[in-house]
Amino acid sequence: MSSVLTIVVILVALLIGLALAYVPMRLLLESMARNIKQFIERQRERRQTPREGPDRRTLEKTLEEKP
């Protein structure tokens, strides 16, 4: 009887420990995902705005062809 009670107490302690670790982990992952989504949106907005000056990709090609 005491061994069964010991196993039950250990299982309850493990479940409480997992539950207490799950909540902060979930909050951390959600905040990281939110930051990544915001970063992707900012990059998408930056790429859509026109830039000043010539396109560097075509500028490099023209410089390679000149010599």
Image (cartoon, grey):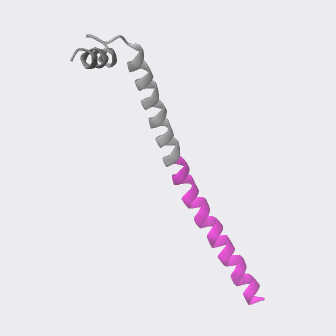
Judged by its main secondary structure, the magenta piece is helix
Picture coordinates of residue 19, whole percent (x, y) = 61, 60
Residue at point 58% right, 66% down? 17
Find the magenta span and give its range: 1-27
Q: Is residue 39 left or right of residue 56?
A: right
Task: Assess whether residue 48 is covered by the magenta stretch.
Answer: no
User: With 35 as the anchor, is 59 left or right in this view?
Assistant: left
Left or right position of 38 against 65:
right
Relative to 59, is 20 above or below? below
What residue is shown at x 28% (from left), y 16% (from top)? 65
Measured along the vertical axis of the image, is residue 59 above or below residue 21? above
- The quadrant of the rendering that contains the C terminus is top left
- Of 38 and 57, nearer the camera is 57
For the residue pair 38 and 52, the one nearer the viewer reads as: 52
* Residue 48 point in image, percent of width and height: 42, 14
Residue nearest the observer in this picture, 25 or 60: 60
